Amino acid sequence: MYYVFLPLPLIYYFYVWNYLTGHRPAWRRFAAICLAATLWFQGGVILKQLTTGRSVYFDRAKLVEAIQQKNYHILWERREGSYY
């Protein structure tokens, strides 16, 4: 959830720093670069999550089967090599 909501505090952060540093163009340029990097990173995370397919939304049939059989191993392990 950190990566999903990160742009919101960053926008507020840039607003506060803009107020504290005055209207110097260097700070605005730095803030724009940081914001662009954050948006680029967020886009990459979204694309990775959509392309890997490791989501309960993609494996609904498996999810229903796991709930009916009450067996969480049907979907996948929490972490590979983990012992419960």
Image (cartoon, rainbow, N blue to C red):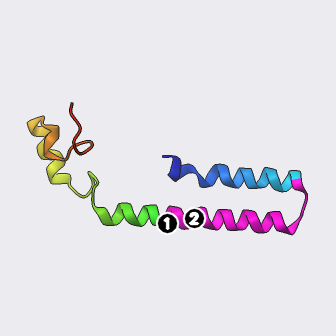
Residue 38: percent from the left, percent from the top? 59, 61
Residue type beneath disc 1: Gly
Residue 7's place in the image compared with 44, above or below, is above
Tag 1 secondary structure? helix
The quarter of the picture where the C terminus appears is: top left
Residue 42: percent from the left, percent from the top? 51, 61
Spatial CA distance of label 1 from label 2 is 6 Å
Q: Residue at x 27, y 61 (%)?
A: 53
Extent of the magenta region: 21-43
Q: Is residue 37 magenta?
A: yes
Q: Quadrant of residue 30?
A: bottom right
65 lies left or right of 3: left
- The extreme front residue here reads 81
Q: Residue at x 83, y 56 (%)?
A: 18
> Tag 2: Cα neighbours inside 10 Å, few (<14), some, or many (≥20)?
some
Labelled pair 1, 2 in contact (Cβ < 8 Å): yes
Look at mark 2 in the image and give the residue it sits on.
39
For residue 20, the mark is none
70 lies left or right of 80: left
Q: Name the one closer to the observer, 1 or 64.
A: 1
Q: Name the one closer to the observer, 80 or 50.
A: 80
> Tag 1: Cα neighbours inside 10 Å, few (<14), some, or many (≥20)?
few
Q: Residue at x 80, y 65 (%)?
A: 28
Residue 25: percent from the left, percent from the top? 85, 69
Look at mark 1 in the image and give the residue it sits on.
43
Tag 2 secondary structure? helix
Residue type beneath disc 2: Leu
Identify the main secondary structure in magenta.
helix
- The extreme left residue here reads 69
Q: Residue at x 30, y 63 (%)?
A: 52
